[in-house]
Image: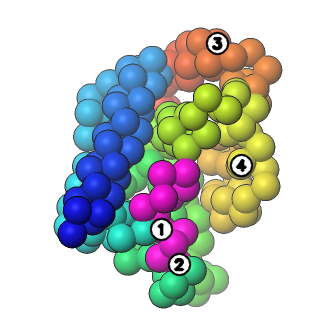
């Protein structure tokens, strides 16, 4: 029982540290209010219980759930409630009769960038560099699952982070405004 309480406290501290970093990043990106509401679903029973059960401290607990169960109930819950995840942005195309990626609004791509940078910092700790987010993006399959324009935008910002550093990347991202329709 003490071990479970310890894991619960460690998981709580990890998700809270991540959330606070995202809030700071969202402030730098010009979406402060959005940052205040970032990942609140991680504190819900559905996500928190699984997070405690599979907590390791060096990677997302959803990986452990997937290994053991074949899926992560917390991830399914999370991605369906948080618009900064590209998986949220899929819809049924009545012409092709398939589910397809939808272009994400700029403010959610900004939050996704903030989220990815913060996750790298939390999970890699002192080993984090501004190269890590683009390397993680390039080795994964997210780019192939996102809407092409969303993937291109995010990848460009991650390359800017790598080349110019955090301050320059956030200054640039903050300067971008959503197109009026």
Asked if 75 appears above or below 96 in the picture, the reply is: above
The residue identified by callout 2 is 66
Asked if 179 appears above or below 39 in the picture, the reply is: above
Q: Earlier in the sequence, mark 4 or mark 1?
A: 1
Q: Which mark is residue 62?
A: 1
Q: Earlier in the sequence, mark 3 or mark 1?
A: 1
Q: Which residues are magenta?
A: 55-66
The answer to if 64 sits in the magenta stretch is yes
Q: Quadrant of residue 155?
A: top right
Mark 2–mark 4 Cα distance, whole angstroms, equals 20 Å
Residue 168 seen in this snapshot: yes
Query: Residue 4 placed where, x, y %?
Result: 27, 65
Mark 1–mark 2 Cα distance, whole angstroms, equals 6 Å
The residue identified by callout 3 is 168
Mark 3–mark 4 Cα distance, whole angstroms, equals 20 Å
Mark 3–mark 1 Cα distance, whole angstroms, equals 32 Å
Q: Earlier in the sequence, mark 2 or mark 4?
A: 2
């Amino acid at each position: 029982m003490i071990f479970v309480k310890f894991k619960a406290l460690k998981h709580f501290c990890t998700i809270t540290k991540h959330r606070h970093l995202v809030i700071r990043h969202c402030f730098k990106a010009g979406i402060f209010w959005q940052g205040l509401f970032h990942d609140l679903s991680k504190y819900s029973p559905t996500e928190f219980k699984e997070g405690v059960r599979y907590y390791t401290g060096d990677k997302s607990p959803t990986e452990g759930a997937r290994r053991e169960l074949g899926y992560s109930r917390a991830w399914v819950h999370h991605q369906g409630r948080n618009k900064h995840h590209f998986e949220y942005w899929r819809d049924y195309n009545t012409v092709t009769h398939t589910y397809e990626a939808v272009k994400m609004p700029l403010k959610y791509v900004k939050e996704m960038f903030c989220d990815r940078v913060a996750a790298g910092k939390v999970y890699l700790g002192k080993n984090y560099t501004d190269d890590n987010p683009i390397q993680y993006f390039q080795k994964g399959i997210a780019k192939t699952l996102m809407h092409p324009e969303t993937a291109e935008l995010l990848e460009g910002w991650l390359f800017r982070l790598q080349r110019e550093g955090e301050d320059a990347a956030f200054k640039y991202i903050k300067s971008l405004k959503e197109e009026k329709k």
